[in-house]
Amino acid sequence: MPCTGLLFRWRFVATGEGYVRGKKDREVVSEEWIANLNTEFRAKGVEQRRRPWEAIRRYSEEFNASVDLSSDIAKTIFKWFEVHSKPGVHQIGSLYEAVYFFDSQFWVVSIPITYGTVQLNALDSLREMPESIKQEMMADHKQAWDYAIYWADCVDYGMGIDDLRKTQGLNEFGAQLLMSADQELRAATSILSQHRPDPRAILNCRMALEMYFKSYIALKTGLSQSQAKSIGHDLNKGLDRFIEVSGLNDWAKTRGLLTVFPEIHERYKEQDITLKRIWDGYSFAHSLGAVIIREFTDRNTLEQVMASNNAN
């Protein structure tokens, strides 16, 4: 399948809470409107770095309009707050970052901050990857498809973890475990993004996986401290309980991947593990995190990716 065909087919619309579908942007936004909002934000104690994003969200709501970050509306809002804020406070980052392993190298996958109904190109998320390497990856249909699925996991996880952080009524213990797992996964991402990844990142992946297992069980059926202790650090027990509670029997096929993780007592030892095996552990944990997000939110970019593949 030609590379260009895959490139154009992998464009998906990501919407949900905070992502507003509506009319085209208005031609202008007045300084008076922005200044009044800033006065309101100041009174409410809204941090300066959050103010342009809150202003864009309010614009979307008040005028029922999608706001692309490259639009004149967004540029006007950011420019106003740049002039009226502490220098450097509004540097734009990513909504979420993960890593992807290809050609014996970890590559950062950046999911952008978006407002309104937008199209996301999966390959654009690999900002550091040269075009020549992207083309090589896309020329291999299986590799290209694997990346598309992983990218969908990144979109759902990156957008959905914040949804769950704000969701009321979740099992408290389950939510705590989920956020702890998220911290471990992000720590692994930070380590693997470095020029020379530290093999000890596999320990972060192990802890993330363990807590994702327990988090899902707690969020789905409840899990007491004593029940969590009965699972302990045994990843096989965690997987068994996850499959039992979720009914996702296909996950039994992943049991072999548990061997990439060191035993818990080996955390004090030097870690001797290949980058490929670290990737196996990292992607396993990340995939489970995405399953949790799709279970407890309305995020499901993966469904769009699968539909796109079936249509072709």
Image: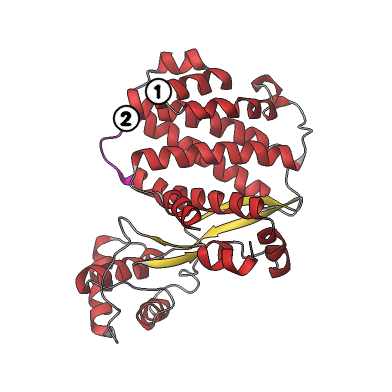
Provide the secondary structure element on which disc 2 rests: loop
Q: Where does residue 183 sit, x and y in percent of width and height?
A: 51, 41
Camera-nearest residue between 80 and 294 = 294
Frontmost residue, 123 versus 1 = 1
Q: Is residue 299 placed above or below 207 in the rendered structure?
A: below
Q: Residue at x 57, y 22 (%)?
A: 235
Q: Quadrant of residue 185?
A: top right
Direction from residue 174 to residue 5 in the image, left or right: right
User: Which residue is situated farthest in the left direction here?
Assistant: 62
Q: Which residues are magenta?
A: 166-173
Say whether residue 170 is magenta: yes
Q: Residue at x 59, y 29 (%)?
A: 254
**Which residue corresponds to the image point at 54% horizontal and 49% vertical from the top-left?**
149
Going by the image, does 231 lie left or right of 224? right
Q: Secondary structure at mark 1?
A: helix
Q: Nearer the viewer, residue 200 or 246?
A: 246
Q: Which mark is residue 171?
A: 2
Q: What amino acid type is highlighted by mark number 2?
A: Asn
Identify residue type, mark 1. Val
Q: CA distance from mark 2 to mark 1?
A: 15 Å
Colour scheme of the rendered structure: secondary structure
Instruction: Residue at 65%, 26% (x, y): give it.
Output: 256
The circle drawn on residue 245 is 1
Q: Is residue 287 magenta?
A: no
